Image (cartoon, rainbow, N blue to C red):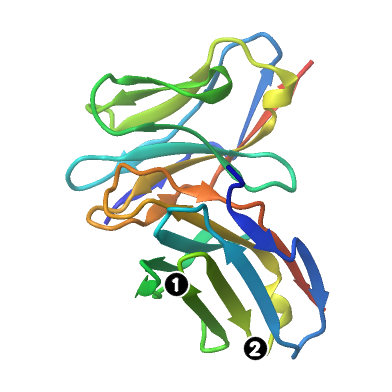
Amino acid sequence: AQSVAQPEDQVNVAEGNPLTVKCTYSVSGNPYLFWYVQYPNRGLQFLLKYITGDNLVKGSYGFEAEFNKSQTSFHLKKPSALVSDSALYFCAVRESGTDKLIFGTGTRLQVFP
Amino acid sequence: DAGVIQSPRHEVTEMGQEVTLRCKPISGHNSLFWYRQTMMRGLELLIYFNNNVPIDDSGMPEDRFSAKMPNASFSTLKIQPSEPRDSAVYFCASSFPGTERNTIYFGEGSWLTVV
């Protein structure tokens, strides 16, 4: 069965520093991987997805993610964090043969001024 | 584009009452999903529809929960009778169907409190 794991409940980073939010996956077949962000009292917003092709995927708000097949990882990155990036981030994988998205447990990103 | 529209945004109800949550998917999207988010269990898929037909309802917790999609632009999630443990945020989401590559877009959620 497909699954994703987000090993960190919270990530703290200073404004201006690079940030990484980790995600590892377990799939049979081709992985279709997604990142979403949730701001307080809001719905989930799509950031980016990996389907095929380049291992570095660029998304909204300056975020990017690196697909690494050998390490089965899909870490979310940003070169310079903003206080406004503080939110809950979810990694997700599409269940093979279905339309379903399976979500990780989420990582809370806190960016300090 | 209006996005996925959910109502009500917030609801407080008494235990035992019926709750109906509503969703209008993005126009042209034929797949519709209902998710529930709680602190304890995270994001759970309750049910999803393709072309108004329920495809997988294995996540529906109990018979107290039911979902319908009478047409391509409207879906409901009903809880009857409601219990305090149903307190959660319920998200509706939609996408184009038929391929794993498509992005799922979420509504702003219905925040339910059962007292």
Where does label 2 land, which residue? B80
Verify CB contact (< 8 Å) between mark 2 and mark 1. Answer: no
- Residue A74's mark? none
Looking at the image, residue B53 sits to the left or right of residue B39; the answer is left
Tag 2: Cα neighbours inside 10 Å, few (<14), some, or many (≥20)?
A: some
Instruction: Give me the chain letter of mark 1.
Output: B
Q: Position of residue A10 (x, y in %)?
A: 62, 35
Q: Position of residue A38 (x, y in %)?
A: 63, 41
- The amino acid beneath tag 1 is Gly
Q: Residue A113 appears in which quarter of the rendering?
A: top right
Classify B37 as above or below A40: below
Could you tell me if residue B60 is visible in this image? no
Q: Position of residue B14 (x, y in %)?
A: 82, 84
- Label 2, label 1: how far apart the Cα atoms are: 17 Å
Q: Residue A61 appears in which quarter of the rendering?
A: top right
Looking at the image, residue B79 sits to the left or right of residue A48; the answer is right
Which quarter of the rendering shows the C terminus of chain B?
Answer: bottom right
Q: Residue at x 75, y 88 (%)?
A: B17
Front position among marks 2 and 1: 2
Which quarter of the rendering shows the N terminus of chain B?
Answer: top right
Q: Position of residue B46 (x, y in %)?
A: 48, 69
Q: Residue at x 75, y 61 (%)?
A: B9
**Camera-side residue: A28 or A13?**
A28
Q: Residue at x 49, y 53 (%)?
A: B27
- The amino acid beneath tag 2 is Gln
- N-terminal of the two: label 2 or label 1? 1
- Residue B59's mark? 1
